[in-house]
Amino acid sequence: MIYIDFLTTAEGKLTGFRMAGHSGYVPEGEDDIVCAAVTSAALMSINTITDVLMVNPMSARAEYGEIFLRVAVKDEAEVRPILKGLKLHLENLEEQYPQNIKVSYLEVQ
């Protein structure tokens, strides 16, 4: 299961996300379309935020089995369209693959 937590402020503003796990859609070692879809969307979002919008994240990392991004609240308005698009995309994937993806929200300070 891929667990995705969108980081939100108390006001509901998106300030980042954390993804961890593997979908288990196919046996480990085989090409997994669910993992590929989630990973590709996450990396495109991070690259757009950091290399196109030129926003310096508070924290960002992409490692095997985990992807994390958090931006400062002051940058939330600028990255909002990207994070909202990612959220919609991942929620749609969750509907298609409910046994493999779980989207939730985590309030952060």
Image (cartoon, grey):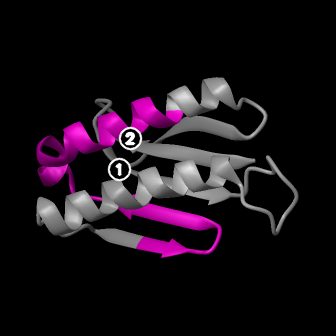
**Which of 31 and 2 lies nearest the eye of the viewer?**
31
Is 105 drawn above or below residue 78 in the view shown? Answer: above
Q: Residue furthest top?
A: 95
Query: Percent from the top left, x then y, of residue 56?
Result: 18, 70
Give 108 or 32, whichever is nearer the viewer: 32
Crowding at dot 2, Cα within 10 Å, few <14 / some 14-19 / many 20+, comes out as some
Which amino acid is tagged 2? Answer: Leu
* Mark 2 secondary-structure assignment: helix
Q: CA distance from mark 2 to mark 1?
A: 21 Å
Q: Magenta segment, which residues? A: 61-90
The amino acid on which the numbered mark 1 sits, given as a three-letter code, is Gln
Position of 65 relative to 34 (above/below): below
In the orientation shown, which residue stands out farthest toward the front? 31
**Residue in view at x 65 percent, y 46 percent:** 34
Could one spot residue 9 in this view of the protein? no
Q: Earlier in the sequence, mark 2 or mark 1?
A: 2
Whole-percent x, y for residue 103 in the image? 58, 36
Question: Crowding at label 1, few (<14), some or many (≥20) Cα neighbours within 10 Å?
Answer: few
The answer to whether any part of residue 20 appears in the image is: yes
Q: What SS does tag 1 mark?
A: loop
Q: Quadrant of residue 45?
A: bottom left
Q: Which residue has dot 1 on it?
A: 109
Position of 88 relative to 46 (above/below):
above
On the image, the x and y values in percent for residue 80 come to 21, 40
Dominant SS of magenta comes to: helix
Magenta region includes residue 8: no
For image coordinates 72% across by 60% down, the residue present is: 31
Q: Position of residue 13 (x, y in %)?
A: 28, 36
Q: Nearer the viewer, mark 2 or mark 1?
A: 2
Residue located beneath label 2 in the image: 86
